[in-house]
């Protein structure tokens, strides 16, 4: 697309100097044909002083304002204030255009938007976008995914903009009139026709984004707020020079309350020493402190997605006492984590070197050796992972994860009676045990009729016949009970899957 300096005739540039210097000198004055004003006596339009949102985070580079790259905090930048006709909130000290009656009972509107100069990191140029609310989402600038997510390090500078959609659409309808458009068409850039102007008039201007499409039709490409002001001023002057002074719209750009926190986002690509460059520089100097800028940063969102909280044993205070040879005794656990993430209870030895994962809220310590164990909470998103032999350090997830700082102490005791270690001793051997899923060999001094594997909640996880080798690849890490029906009676053994 062509830039401004390639298209603006010299006469228009000279006329624009007076117009734009007048605009710059008052910082709020624009030729206004609908608020007791005319091209000879401009009416006042003041976009007000936009307040930096109190909720805007200041954790950007050098303590400056920031916005998260995934867009999760974009609502922090919504502006407070009264609502304009387009539902855009505007500052209290703004002096907006007043509605005026047009032909055939039509009225102009009073509208307010926020214009963003967006400079993607690593890009050679910037571009403009606008919103009604004053919120900007760097992950979805057009709300439809058509613009790529802004990379870390991009800058977004914003200013308030007041104007009248009703007036601009009225002007567009007049320009689209075949007779008027025919008079103006010689000034259009090559390739732009009255038919295209007519098509835009049918769809109408609904936002500043649409207004910039109109300026591009006239040949003025705006990649920054000063360039947008320049383009609008040049179009105003085009109307005046061609005998349509009533087609000079009302608009104004807002200042910001804290200019010390602002930086200039002016991109001046005009040829050095050119008239256009001088005009853009004047605008840049005047508005350098009036664009509130944010830096796109990457923030770890995991603390908002996972929360291990504090695990506890339901209805139990202090250490939990359990019997190693009581299959019917279950311990119920709960936690104070308040997220919708997945949750597991991690059973670890006191030194943290041996760990097992349990993905239910009930656990049976049947078959555990006498020991004092610790049960941690583990909140995670994505796929759970447990590296054998790495202890607590081997617990992870493919996305976000948090291990609780506190734990439930569980004391495993031998409560007497016949335990797993003695029942069927020497008659049943399984290997390897512990097992990492590579398969299990069963050697038994009896004829096997059938077998099964139960988890510590007593649930059946695998049943098999007389085969001497089992596939354990599908078993999750943890303790299991292997039961055999043989011609010598029942036999059992504990099984550990790492």
Image (spheres, helix red, strand yellow):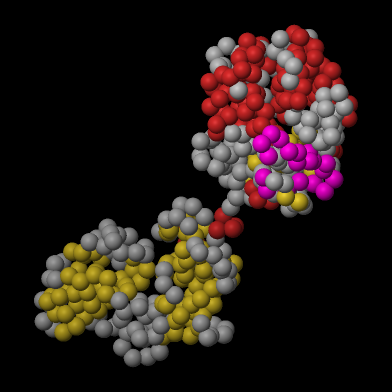
Bounds of the magenta segment: 86-105
Outermost residue on the bottom side: it is 417
Q: Residue furthest front?
A: 104
Residue 445 x, y percent position in the rendering: 15, 76
Give how far across and how far down residue 94 sits, in percent: 82, 43
Number of marks = 0
Q: Quadrant of residue 431?
A: bottom left
Residue 296 position within the rendered picture, expressed as x and y whole percent measured from the top left: 65, 40
Find residue 129 and report its image quarter: top right
Q: Nearer the viewer, residue 96 or 427?
A: 96
Q: Is residue 183 left or right of residue 283?
A: left
Please state, as top left, top right, bottom left or bottom right, where the C terminus lies in the image.
bottom left
Q: Is residue 353 left or right of residue 131?
A: left
Q: Is residue 59 visible?
A: no
Confirm whether the magenta stretch covers residue 242. Answer: no
Q: Quadrant of the N terminus?
A: top right
* 187, above or below 177, in the image: above
- Occupied quadrant, residue 165: top right
């Amino acid at each position: 697309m062509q830039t401004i300096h390639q298209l603006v005739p010299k006469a228009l540039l000279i006329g624009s100097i007076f117009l734009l210097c007048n605009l710059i000198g008052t910082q709020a004055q624009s030729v206004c044909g609908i608020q007791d004003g005319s091209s000879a006596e401009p009416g006042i339009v003041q976009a007000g002083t936009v307040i930096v949102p109190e909720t805007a985070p200041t954790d950007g580079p050098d303590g400056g304002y920031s916005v998260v790259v995934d867009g999760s905090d974009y609502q922090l930048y919504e502006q407070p204030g009264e609502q304009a006709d387009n539902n855009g909130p505007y500052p209290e000290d703004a002096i907006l255009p007043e509605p005026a009656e047009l032909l055939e009972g039509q009225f102009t509107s009073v509208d307010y938007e926020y214009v963003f100069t967006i400079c993607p990191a690593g890009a050679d140029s910037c571009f403009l976008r606008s919103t009604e609310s004053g919120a900007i989402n760097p992950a979805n600038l057009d709300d439809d995914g058509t613009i790529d997510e802004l990379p870390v390090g991009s800058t977004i500078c914003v200013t308030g903009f007041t104007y009248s959609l009703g007036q601009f659409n009225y002007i567009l309808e007049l320009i689209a009139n075949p007779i008027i458009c025919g008079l103006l068409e010689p000034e259009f850039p090559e390739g732009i026709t009255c038919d295209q102007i007519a098509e835009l008039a049918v769809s109408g201007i609904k936002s500043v984004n649409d207004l910039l499409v109109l300026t591009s039709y006239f040949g003025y490409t705006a990649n920054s707020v000063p360039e947008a002001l320049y383009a609008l001023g040049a179009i105003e002057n085009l109307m005046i020079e061609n005998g349509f002074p009533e087609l000079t719209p009302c608009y104004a750009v807002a200042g910001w309350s804290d200019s010390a926190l602002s930086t200039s986002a002016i991109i001046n690509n005009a040829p050095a020493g050119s008239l256009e460059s001088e005009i853009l520089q004047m605008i840049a100097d005047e508005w350098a402190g009036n664009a509130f800028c944010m830096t796109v940063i990457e923030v770890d969102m995991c603390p908002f997605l996972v929360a291990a909280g504090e695990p506890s044993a339901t209805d139990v205070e202090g250490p939990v006492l359990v019997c190693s040879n009581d299959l019917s005794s279950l311990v119920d656990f709960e936690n104070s984590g308040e997220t919708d993430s997945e949750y597991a209870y991690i059973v670890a030895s006191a030194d943290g070197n041996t760990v097992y994962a349990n993905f239910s809220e009930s656990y049976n310590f049947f078959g555990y050796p006498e020991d004092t164990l610790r049960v941690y909470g583990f909140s995670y998103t994505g796929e759970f992972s447990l590296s054998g032999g790495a202890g607590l350090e081997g617990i992870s997830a493919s996305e976000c994860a948090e291990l609780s700082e506190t734990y439930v102490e569980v004391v495993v005791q031998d409560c007497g009676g016949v335990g797993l270690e003695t029942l069927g001793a020497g008659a049943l051997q399984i290997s390897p045990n512990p097992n990492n899923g590579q398969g299990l060999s069963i050697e038994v001094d009896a004829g096997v009729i059938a077998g099964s594997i139960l988890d510590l909640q007593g649930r059946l996880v695998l049943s098999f016949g007389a085969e001497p080798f089992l596939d354990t690849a599908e078993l999750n890490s943890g303790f299991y009970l292997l039961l055999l029906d043989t011609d010598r009676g029942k036999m059992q053994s504990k099984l550990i899957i790492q």
